[in-house]
């Protein structure tokens, strides 16, 4: 774990140091083998103890070299293991833009690339291959100026485009010259697509937010309005630059309503179910006019921020108030009409009572003041004509004080006065001849009127006796 945690630069530096030590040991051994023996050395060689010492030194040097080589191989193995399992792509690129080596991740992404053939990176990594270095290539820039560079690519891969994030750093030799560049490659395609989807979604929701018919605003926990839409500007009269981040939600509420609205605001963040999502409120526009609005409020999930939509219902509320006022007026008029009707009923009752009283007086007067004289005349008249006329007079007086004429007039307003007169005589038992003599007309005229009376009483072509009908129904 200690080795895996080493940085890429430390591993590369360690590798270079080991390679240089091996190179020095190989050169020292080669010089030792090629140097001729001097007389002193030959003389010394005759001394066993000197030869043994030299042999021992050489053996120690060889053992040290083997240890160094083993350490180098172990270090290279660790380096390779780290690079292959680092989780991102790693490529070593030469100054001629040749691919020198690829780690496991890069080989999975580009299985057709063979580093042993040292292909050009801009040809091997692009499908179809490019003819020159990519314009965005950070590795080319690193090789040019020796600095670390980063870029996001649009790499063609057949029918699709892959997006890679590449960070390139230089590898230098002992003299500081750039030997190669290391590319650290991360596949950002899915993340890039997700970001693009998020951008599209944000664009779509912003369009909805901006074009909705309701004034909409985003409200922070401290009641600051952080965002408003175009409809809010148009309806309320404030520009967004004067509202966003500068005004509080409560500044648009009449002072007497602020306490209740603030309770809704606080409760929505602690217990959303305890407050209504939709409610009516009063809102102040930029001119200080009170607008009636229908508020729809909800929390944005995972935040302390809420969104409120304001639908202007001022005209509807004005209409409701006008209707209510009209209903109150109609109710007042209705009460007044009821009082008038009561008064009329009293008057009509009084009229009926007066009429009844008048009829009773008329009946009494006729009976007491007229009928006695009729009886007296009966005793004094001698001729048939006088007696007949007096009989008619008596009959008519009785009819006046009887309900017949009133009933037949009310129920059959289409009867003429002559027809009513004849119907009255028929009811009193007079024949056609008697009626003709009394009215001094022909019997044919009386028959004509009798037919009209039967037609208007709907007795035409019926066997009903006219006198019986009049006696029964009137």
Image: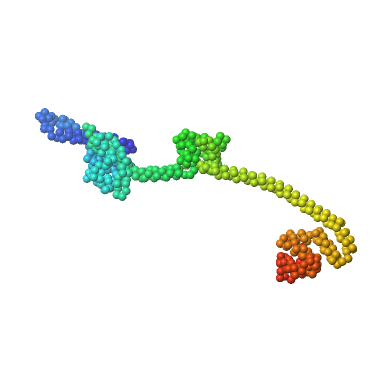
Q: Nearer the viewer, residue 256 or 239?
A: 239
Total numbered badges shown on the rendered structure: 0
Query: What's the coloring here?
Result: rainbow
Q: Nearer the viewer, residue 276 or 37?
A: 276
Direction top: furthest residue:
40
Image quadrant where residue 382 sits: bottom right
Quarter of the image that includes the N terminus: top left
Image quadrant where residue 365 sits: bottom right
Quarter of the image that includes the C terminus: bottom right
Residue at 56 percent of width and 36 percent of height = 257
The x, y position of residue 470, in whole percent, is 77, 65
Residue at 56 percent of width and 34 percent of height = 255
Direction left: furthest residue:
39
* Left or right of residue 316: residue 94: left
Say whether residue 362 is visible. Answer: yes
Residue at 24 percent of width and 43 percent of height = 132
Say whether residue 218 is visible. Answer: no
Q: Nearer the viewer, residue 276 or 249?
A: 249
Q: Is residue 130 above or below residue 16?
A: below
Q: Nearer the viewer, residue 427 or 311?
A: 427
The x, y position of residue 357, in whole percent, is 81, 53
Q: Is residue 312 above or below residue 474?
A: above
The x, y position of residue 21, in whole percent, is 22, 34
The x, y position of residue 72, in whole percent, is 25, 37
Residue at 79 percent of width and 69 percent of height = 433
């Amino acid at each position: 774990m200690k080795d895996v945690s080493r940085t890429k630069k430390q591993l590369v530096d360690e590798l270079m140091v080991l390679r240089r030590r091996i190179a020095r040991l190989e050169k020292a051994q080669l010089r030792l083998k090629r140097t001729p023996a001097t007389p002193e050395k030959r003389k010394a060689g005759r001394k066993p103890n000197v030869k043994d010492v030299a042999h021992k030194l050489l053996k120690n040097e060889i053992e040290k070299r083997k240890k160094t080589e083993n350490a180098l191989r172990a270090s290279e193995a660790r380096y390779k293991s780290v690079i292959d399992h680092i989780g991102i792509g790693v490529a070593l690129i030469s100054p001629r833009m040749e691919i020198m080596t690829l780690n496991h991740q890069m080989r999975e992404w580009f299985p057709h690339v063979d580093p042993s053939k040292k292909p050009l990176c801009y040809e091997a990594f692009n499908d179809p291959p490019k003819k020159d270095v990519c314009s965005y290539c950070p590795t080319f820039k690193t090789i040019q100026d020796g600095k670390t560079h980063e870029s996001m690519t649009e790499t063609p891969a057949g029918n699709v485009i892959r997006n890679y994030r590449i960070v390139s750093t230089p590898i230098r030799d002992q003299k500081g010259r750039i030997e190669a560049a290391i590319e650290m490659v991360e596949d950002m395609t899915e993340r890039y697509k997700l970001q693009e989807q998020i951008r599209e979604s944000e664009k779509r929701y912003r369009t909805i937010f901006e074009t909705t018919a309701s004034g909409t605003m985003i409200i922070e926990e401290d009641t600051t309005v952080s965002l408003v839409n175009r409809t809010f500007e148009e309806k309320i009269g404030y520009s967004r630059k004067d509202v966003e981040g500068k005004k509080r939600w409560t500044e648009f509420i009449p002072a007497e309503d602020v306490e209740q609205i603030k309770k809704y605001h606080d409760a929505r963040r602690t217990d959303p179910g305890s407050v209504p999502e939709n409610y009516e409120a009063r809102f102040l526009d930029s001119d200080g006019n009170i607008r009636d609005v229908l508020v729809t409020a909800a929390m944005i999930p995972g935040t302390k921020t809420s969104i409120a939509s304001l639908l202007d219902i001022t005209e509807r509320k004005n209409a409701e108030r006008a209707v209510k006022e009209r209903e109150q007026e109609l109710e007042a008029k209705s009460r007044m009409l009821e009082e008038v009707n009561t008064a009329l009923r009293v008057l009509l009752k009084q009229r009926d009572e007066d009429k009844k009283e008048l009829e009773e007086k008329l009946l009494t007067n006729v009976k007491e003041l007229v009928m006695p004289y009729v009886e007296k005349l009966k005793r004094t008249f001698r001729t048939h004509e006088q007696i007949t006329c007096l009989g008619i007079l008596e009959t008519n007086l009785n009819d006046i004080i009887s309900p017949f004429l009133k009933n037949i007039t009310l129920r059959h307003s289409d009867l003429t006065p002559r027809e009513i007169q004849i119907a009255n005589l028929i009811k009193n038992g007079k024949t056609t001849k008697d009626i003709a003599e009394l009215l001094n007309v022909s019997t044919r005229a009386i028959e004509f009127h009798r037919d009209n009376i039967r037609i208007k009483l709907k007795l035409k072509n019926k066997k009903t006796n006219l006198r019986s009908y009049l006696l029964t129904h009137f």
